[in-house]
Amino acid sequence: MRIVVLLGAPGSGKGTIAGRLAASDALLRHVSSGDLLRDAVRRQTAAGVEADGYMRRGELVPDGLIARMVGDLTVGVDSACTLLLDGFPRTVAQAGMLDATVASCGASFGPVVLLEVPDAMLVERIAGRRGCPACGAGYHVTNIPPAREGLCDVCGTGLVVRKDDNPETVRNRLAVYRTQTMPLIDFYGARDHLRRVDATGPIDEIVVRVRQTLA
Ligand code: AP5
């Protein structure tokens, strides 16, 4: 098993790129900590109830909750698979948890791919993001519009705005990224795991760039 990480600010395209990569490779599994948490919130599990307030405010949920959630990350995963982590780790403490997981299951680790996008573009991408609450398909009102305005191309359900995509929460998420997640850039840079990718421009081109770093 191999574990690779997609690192990047809110709106940098982690979910979009990971989804495209996984769709074209049966051995690549996309694991999004944000999606796992949103699912827990929807189902009102104990973890979801605890996480909800933090997520609404754009703060990171406590590391202890993440530890419980990702503790069984590799359980039942075929040894031929690559796990593509999107949104985890997000703090240096979480990187330590991941090290322990990698060591305990004998996986290989790396690279950590940093998606680089200018701040103004991050805000524009998040402002236009829409998602399908039924099947999870993602859109952008101008960059990736659905064929019929406001409706999912896959299942026809009405598209929604994520609860934490309002301007105030987005400002907080970007600030949290700078203070709590950006230290991982130096952390993984010092270990020579970091690969920087220009994540502007057409999605297909970004997918090719990221795939090259994974080869
Ligand atoms: P999470 O869901 O991980 O959110 P995030 O990191 O803020 O990232 P986003 O989902 O906003 O953006 P993305 O990079 O995936 O971009 P996307 O592909 O959607 O986390 C949410 C919350 O959960 C956190 O705030 C925290 O509370 C909690 N959490 C999660 N993990 C945690 C952890 N490990 N520890 C503690 N707390 C945790 O793209 C954005 C938009 O741009 C889309 O509309 C897309 O269509 C569009 N787009 C993408 N690429 C392009 C392109 N090349 N050109 C044009 N448009 C594009």
Image (tube, rainbow, N blue to C red):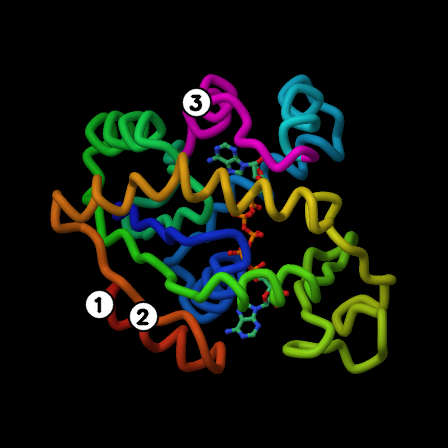
210 left or right, relative to 192:
right
45 left or right, relative to 158:
left
- For mark 1, give the secondary structure: loop
Q: Amino acid at mark 3?
A: Ala
The residue tagged 3 is 67
Cα separation, mark 3 vs mark 2, equals 28 Å
Q: Amino acid at mark 2?
A: Arg
Numbered tag placed on residue 40 in the rendering: none
Residue at left offset 66%, top offset 42%: 169
Contact check, label 2 and label 1, Cβ < 8 Å: yes
Numbered tag placed on residue 215 in the rendering: 1
Q: Say which quadrant the C terminus sits in.
A: bottom left
Q: Amino acid at mark 1?
A: Ala
Give, as a single range, the part of the protein colored magenta.
56-73
Q: Where, by quadrant of the figure, is residue 208 drawn?
A: bottom left
The residue tagged 2 is 211
Q: Where, by quadrant of the figure, is residue 38 drawn?
A: top right
146 left or right, relative to 201:
right
